[in-house]
Amino acid sequence: MQKTITFGIPCYNSAKDMDRAVSSILDGSDFASDVQIVIVDDGSSDETPAKADAWAARYPDIVEAVHQENGGHGMAVLAGLRAAQGVYYKVLDSDDWVDPHALKEMLSLLRGFISRGLRVDLFISNYVYEHVADDTRTTITYKSVLPRKKVFSWSEIGHFKPWQNLLMHSLCYRTEVLRAAQVPLPAHTFYVDNIYAYQPLPRCTTMYYADIDLYRYFIGREDQSVNEQVMVGRIDQQLRVTRIMMEAYHLDDDVSEPRLRSYMYMYFTMMMAICSVFSRLSDAPDAMDNLKRLWADLRVYDNRMYQRARHGLVGTATNLPGAMGSKITIGLYHLASRIFKFN
């Protein structure tokens, strides 16, 4: 039987979390044989390898276990993609889960596309921040931006708000499109999900948005990669990811669809803003020098991209000059963090 979708689950020392991720797919899909789950053990030292093998032994027609030397989140995502047999591919991090009712609706739609021979390159759905600290939820939806109940192109989208970026949690790519994109995910690097959610987009010509709250994103733990102090300590990795995104395209030359180009400008500007804020928060002696180098390299690489990212409202607000300017920039970031609860 042809697999409708492959879920790649990157796992590194995930023994305490991974069962919920796997179970949520199995339960939500009613253990359907056209669903594939690829558990990628990324060189774990806990019970993750044994658990992955146990799941594969219990459901051999659905679950596959892949073991590799530790390479980081990006290498695990790509390992899952290599093993994928599904027409579609979606990443589910091991400490997150999917809503069973939303998954049923998603599968019904994807199966319908396949049975009708309808090519849809990108399936988009909502995701939900599940906040650890106060047991609250924040749902990110796209119903104000994207058409519903139809296949559409980039020319039909609206204007995204800054908090409505299409993240890994909201995306399900057609597998062959994602493979053709050859997404450059560096080893031993966090935040590569931004590359994954950015670089393949111009290859996606047909899309479908389902207004369903599919992905449940657990957020708020102190050791989580998006925790502020963790991000400050990994500013070098944030700069690395942003540089890869910078070099992926000359946006004005390479992205012909104006609305997609506008969206990608917004996403890239956000990434430069994150680098600017966390470089200011960092105590590393070379943090600001590295940030200045990134801005200078962007200006040389593509002056139009530099002007849009640096001198728009977001770029200006996150690069205010002087000590007082840095305090205002950081204060604005903390205000946005409290309002939108994104870390």
Image (cartoon, grey):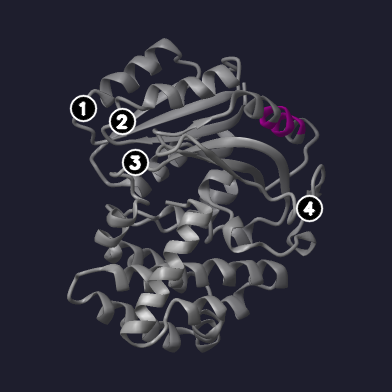
The question of residue 109 being in magenta is answered with yes
Q: Nearer the viewer, mark 3 or mark 4?
A: 3
With respect to residue 261, does 133 lie above or below? above
Specify the label residue 221 is tagged with: 3
Q: Quadrant of residue 43?
A: top left
Does label 4 or label 2 sit earlier along the sequence?
A: 2
| Residue placed under numbered mark 4 in the picture | 152
Instruction: Give the alpha-carbon distance from disc 2 to disc 3, as whole Å.
Output: 14 Å
The residue tagged with tag 4: helix, strand or loop? strand
Q: Amino acid at mark 1?
A: Asp
Instruction: Give the alpha-carbon distance from disc 2 to disc 1, as whole Å.
Output: 8 Å
Stretch in magenta: 106-112
* Front-most of residues 205 and 124: 124
Q: Marks 2 and 3: CB-CB under 8 Å?
A: no
Q: Which residue is pictured at 41% across the width and 76% down the height?
A: 328
Residue 59 x/y as whole percent? 45, 13
Specify the label residue 46 is tagged with: 1
